[in-house]
């Protein structure tokens, strides 16, 4: 096991009706004037918008609002949010929705206090300070409710890039599994895949003697394998929704990643599919992750035997990957990047756009160069 630091101070309020605590938590974490940030309308349809605004009004917490965050959120709305926060003297950002609304809120939170262009953070600059962010999660997927990360797409050049900093880890996150019951099956399934791949990005590691985090990863994967079909069959299955929701948070707050090298090549390759074809992140991962597994398992089969045996209950490297693919198909996920609109001719461009060359590589479990990435995109066709 490698040395590590771990500090994950987000306060979680979990369970039925938990959003009733919103105003109280905003106050507890210092918000006096807030920006209420959300997506494209699902919170209005479900009645969550009404409940939140009413509770803020009742608690006399003034707020500005900015809706319209798109899946795979973009820089233009972030600039708008930064300007609005400065104009309105906002000191706290409240996001309601999924990874997209939360990531956009985090970008605004960092940008408001920064003298330069917020995109600097998405070009490698670490986020040292930000306004506090609180979240009300409506989809179990990205794990942004407990992570120190944000992913934004710069429309010009279609650059989908991540930023990081402890300052953007949410101050609090409200997790009510009931709020996820209105999700369409496709979004539920895509969210489940994202959670599983967040675990795999950490599980496939060359660091040895990490039994505790290996076992945590396996427990989460087994939970997702048993609970996901339940919510696909019965969207209002509260208990299964609850297990998935907490799994999604624990999968990505890095509890399962400490003390080991991590991989992250599948995420890097998927971001290009979201940037160029608007692919739903988890659905893109459902195609890329098995292709990545097929490619890297030939070069480094070690961990795949354990994955097959302990997670899927089968013997053999290929058998484990096949079981994963079969599971993804059973929950309605795509199996080819053609389903997003990509074709063979796009492959070199996709690999090049990641920024890889012969020498510049990515991925922790197996180092991949531009040619390897092309090979993986071809396996995903
Ligand atoms: O916009 P609305 O109308 O709310 O609709 C959303 C959106 O269309 C809908 N939805 C959410 N909750 C719903 C609902 N529909 C009905 N009922 C509900 N309860 O679902 C759609 C997807 O929402 P989105 O926020 O995009 O989903 P997700 O949580 O999967 O977030 C994806 C984004 O997070 C990034 C991804 O790259 C992507 O941009 N990620 C962020 C990470 C992080 N910050 O740590 C890590 C991840 O690896 C990921 O990259
Ligand atoms: Zn992800």
Image (spheres, grey):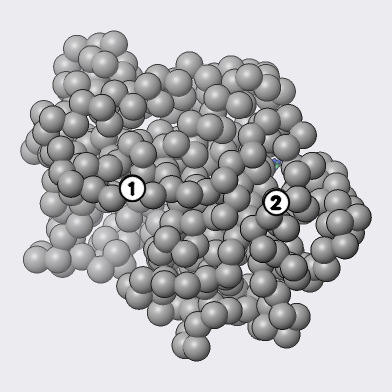
* Residue positioned 57% across, 45% down in the render: 11
The residue indicated by pointer 1 is 6
The residue indicated by pointer 2 is 25
Counting from the top left corner in percent of width and height, residue 187 is at 59, 39
- Name the outermost residue toward the bottom: 115
* Residue positioned 81% across, 51% down in the render: 52
* Residue positioned 49% across, 56% down in the render: 169
Q: Is residue 225 visible?
A: yes
- Left or right: 370, with 264 as reference point: left
Which residue is at the front of the view, 72 or 48? 48
Q: Quadrant of residue 252?
A: top left
Density class for disc 2 (Cα within 10 Å; few <14, some 14-19, many ≥20) is some
- Left or right: 214, with 94 as reference point: left
Which residue is at the front of the view, 235 or 249? 249
Callout 2: CB less than 8 Å from ligand 1: no
Counting from the top left corner in percent of width and height, residue 148 is at 44, 56
Callout 1: CB less than 8 Å from ligand 1: no
Report the quarter where the C terminus lies: top left
- Left or right: 313, with 43 as reference point: left
* Residue positioned 19% across, 21% down in the render: 306
Which residue is at the front of the view, 222 or 346? 222
**Is 314 placed above or below 357 here?**
above
The earlier-in-sequence mark between 2 and 1 is 1
Name the disc covering residue 99, or none.
Answer: none
Q: Element type at marker 2? A: helix
Which residue is at the front of the view, 43 or 113? 113
Pointer 2 with pointer 1, Cβ within 8 A: no
Report the quarter where the N terminus lies: top left
Counting from the top left corner in percent of width and height, residue 75 is at 55, 73
Counting from the top left corner in percent of width and height, residue 271 is at 40, 57
């Amino acid at each position: 096991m490698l040395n590590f630091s771990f500090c994950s101070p987000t306060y979680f309020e979990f369970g039925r009706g938990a959003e009733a605590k919103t105003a109280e938590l905003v106050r507890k974490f210092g918000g006096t004037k807030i920006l209420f940030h959300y997506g494209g309308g699902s919170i209005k349809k479900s009645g969550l918008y009404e409940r939140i605004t009413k509770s803020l009004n009742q608690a006399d917490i003034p707020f500005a609002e900015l809706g319209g965050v798109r899946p795979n959120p973009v820089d233009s709305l972030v600039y708008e949010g930064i300007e609005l926060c400065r104009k309105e003297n906002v000191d706290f950002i409240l996001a309601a929705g999924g990874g997209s609304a939360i990531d956009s809120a985090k970008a605004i939170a960092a940008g408001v206090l920064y003298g330069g262009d917020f995109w600097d953070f998405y070009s490698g600059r670490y986020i040292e300070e930000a306004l506090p962010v609180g979240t009300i999660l409506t989809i179990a997927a990205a794990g942004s409710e407990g992570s120190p990360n944000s992913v934004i797409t710069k429309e010009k050049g279609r650059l989908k890039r991540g930023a990081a900093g402890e300052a953007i880890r949410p101050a609090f996150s409200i997790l009510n599994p009931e709020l996820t019951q209105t999700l369409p099956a496709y979004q539920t399934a895509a969210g489940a895949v994202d959670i599983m791949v967040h675990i795999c990005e950490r599980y496939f590691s060359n660091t040895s003697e990490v039994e505790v985090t290996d076992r945590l990863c396996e427990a989460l994967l087994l939970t997702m394998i048993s609970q996901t079909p339940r919510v696909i069959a019965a969207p209002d299955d509260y208990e299964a929704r609850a297990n998935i929701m907490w799994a999604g948070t624990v999968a990505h707050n890095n509890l399962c990643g400490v003390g080991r090298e991590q991989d992250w090549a599948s995420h890097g390759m998927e971001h290009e599919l979201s940037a160029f074809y608007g692919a739903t992140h988890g659905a893109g991962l459902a195609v890329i992750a098995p292709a990545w597994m097929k490619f890297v398992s030939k070069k480094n089969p070690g961990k795949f035997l354990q994955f097959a045996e302990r997670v899927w209950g089968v013997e053999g490297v290929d058998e484990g990957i096949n079981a994963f693919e079969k599971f993804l198909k059973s929950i309605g996920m795509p199996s080819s990047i053609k389903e997003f609109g990509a074709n063979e001719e796009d492959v070199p461009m996709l690999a090049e756009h990641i920024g890889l060359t012969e020498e510049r590589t990515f991925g922790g479990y197996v180092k991949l160069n531009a040619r390897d990435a092309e090979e993986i995109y071809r396996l995903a066709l």
